């Protein structure tokens, strides 16, 4: 696979993983799923579902740039900007959610790592976009 097509593919996969990671609490919480996850996502400074919307838009832009339906340098730049916003939104939420909210949910213990795992997954989007910019010779 050409190097210029691999980096945006990694970015698109990162976007999908962000969406999957934000869906995970809905599958892990055992009782009162809607209200427990609603409180979990609503307690931080910024709702991480805002990041999910931008991750979806970023996936579309990166896929269009990869297939050259959009100018690849433009798509890489948009991927950096929107991917950075996705990471910042999810990281701000992860840092500001009170731990008591996490411990009050009826879910497996793995949920305590969800916030941090989602932040790490969100970081793949701007990193892949930067990688793509480098392979295109922009930086």
Image (tube, rainbow, N blue to C red):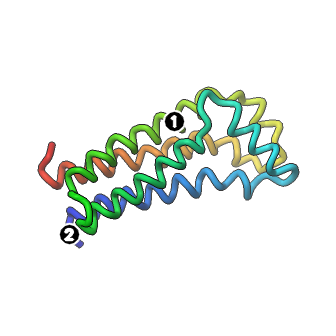
Q: Which residue is mark 2?
A: 2
Q: Residue at x 59, y 44 (%)?
A: 49
Q: Residue at x 61, y 27 (%)?
A: 45
Above or below: residue 29 compared with residue 46? below
How far from the left and from the top, in percent, is residue 7?
A: 29, 59
Q: Is residue 97 left or right of residue 7?
A: right
Give yes or no for contact between labels 1 and 2 (Cβ–Cβ under 8 Å): no
What residue appears at the point 49 percent right and 59 percent down from the top-left corner? 16
Furthest residue to the bottom?
Answer: 1
Residue located farthest toward the left when viewing the structure as drawn: 137
The quarter of the picture where the C terminus appears is top left
Q: Residue at x 27, y 53 (%)?
A: 75
Which numbered marker is on residue 55?
none
Q: How many marks?
A: 2
Marks 1/2: CA–CA distance: 32 Å
Of residues 70 and 133, which is closer to you in this image? 70
Q: Secondary structure at mark 2?
A: loop
The N terminus lies in quadrant: bottom left
Few, some or many C-alpha atoms within 10 Å of disc 2 (few <14, some 14-19, many ≥20)?
A: few
Q: Is residue 71 left or right of residue 21?
A: left
Question: Residue 47 location, x and y as percent?
Answer: 62, 37
The front one of 65 and 109 is 65
Q: Is residue 87 left or right of residue 28?
A: left
Choose mark 1 or mark 2, whichever is in front: 1
Pinpoint residue 40: horizontal percent, then vertical percent.
72, 38
- Indicate the position of residue 81 as horizontal and vertical percent values: 34, 40
Q: Could you tell me which secondary element the residue under label 1 belongs to?
A: helix
Q: Residue tagged by mark 1?
A: 89
Is 116 in front, or is 126? 126
């Amino acid at each position: 696979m050409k190097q210029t097509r691999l980096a945006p593919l990694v970015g698109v996969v990162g976007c999908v993983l962000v969406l999957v990671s934000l869906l995970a609490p809905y599958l892990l919480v055992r009782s009162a799923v809607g209200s427990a996850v609603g409180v979990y996502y609503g307690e931080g400074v910024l709702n991480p579902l805002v990041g999910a919307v931008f991750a979806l838009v970023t996936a579309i832009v990166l896929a269009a740039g990869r297939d050259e339906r959009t100018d690849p340098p433009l798509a890489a730049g948009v991927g950096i900007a929107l991917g950075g916003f996705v990471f910042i939104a999810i990281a701000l939420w992860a840092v500001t959610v009170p731990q008591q909210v996490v411990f009050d949910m009826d879910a497996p213990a793995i949920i305590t790592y969800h916030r941090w795992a989602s932040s790490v997954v969100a970081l793949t989007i701007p990193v892949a976009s930067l990688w793509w910019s480098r392979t295109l010779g922009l930086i």
